[in-house]
Amino acid sequence: MIINFLDKIFNNKSIIASLLKKIIKRFPCLKSSILVKLNATERPPYAYCLYHAARLAKKLNHKTFSVIEFGVAGGNGMNFIEKFSKKISKELDINIEIYGFTLEKGLSNPIDYRDLPYWFSSGYFSTNKDKLLKKLKSSKIIFGDVKETTKNFFDTYKPAPLGVVFNDLDYYSSTINSFNIFLSNQKNYLPRIFCYFDDIIGNEIEMYGEFNGELAAIKKFNNDNPNKKFILNQNLIATLNEPWRYQIYYYHDFMHPQYNVFISKEEQIKQNEDLKLKN
């Protein structure tokens, strides 16, 4: 009851909500499920994806799953992923492997209008390799153009099934190239993957839309793949009053061997019990 009450308070834009979030963030001892529910972390969309991917992996009887961040830059996102993954691993008894893809020199030259050259420019978001590797503890970083580095990723690193993808590559061209990661053997993935796209909201200058940037890449992938789709979440849109609710997508592989595995026994029992109480 208390968590549900706090959830209602946190999901508005009041000053009280902002103050409560700052207070909650000072108590890292709280369970990851509570921090996710209240959006009380430094990177709420990252925490959301990591936690719920871990739950899905557990329900499908996986002991380990993998996380990828495309566009590591200075490594702040990877640093959060490492810390929160460690917390989730301890609480849910599941291992999480972490991989990052990045270019040392930052953004390359835009290919065409879809890369939003009026907003992005070459050299932005470069990576200091030495500082990055010192900052991170358990992640594996792959340097180079994702068009090439994604090709042999699974053969080279042999990661656990992929469960989360954080995409912050900015350009249409690099984003569509990163989607090569979804073209490997189905054993390399969970049947549904939590995806976060950083550059799909923007402002009046960025003017993101379905015909440029990351949204255009999503649209092209969906058009080209009848049995694989990125689907904008519905539950967050309906329940969360935060901008990032529009940045979470669910990748579905409808032909995946585990796609139709029944995983909602506990949730169905709880719903039935709740209905009985109401009646």
Image: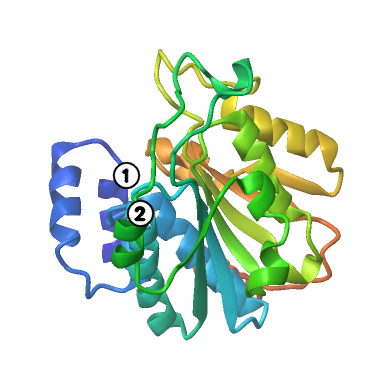
Residue pointed to by mark 1? 11
Element type where label 2 sits in the image: loop
- Of label 2 and label 1, which has the lower sequence position? 1
Instruction: Give the residue displayed 68% in from the left and 60% down from the top.
Output: 192
Q: Nearer the viewer, residue 122 or 161?
A: 122
Q: Position of residue 74 (x, y in %)?
A: 34, 49
Instruction: Give the residue displayed 50% in from the left and 81% down from the top.
Output: 95
Q: Nearer the viewer, residue 135 or 130?
A: 130
**What is the quadrant of the N terminus in the image?**
bottom left
Report, in whole angstroms, how far the alpha carbon at label 2 lies from the one at label 1.
28 Å
Up-down: is 22 above or below 213?
below
Q: Position of residue 27 (x, y in %)?
A: 17, 68
Q: Residues within 10 Å of mark 1 (few under 14, many from 20)?
A: some
Q: Position of residue 231 (x, y in %)?
A: 67, 43
Residue pointed to by mark 2? 75
Closest to the camera, between mark 2 and mark 1, is 2
Instruction: Give the residue displayed 43% in from the left and 50% down from the top.
Output: 72
Up-down: is 26 above or below 150?
below
Would you say residue 219 is visible in this rendering?
yes
Quarter assignment of residue 271: bottom right
> Is residue 246 toward the left or the right of residue 124 in the image?
right
Q: Amino acid at mark 1?
A: Asn
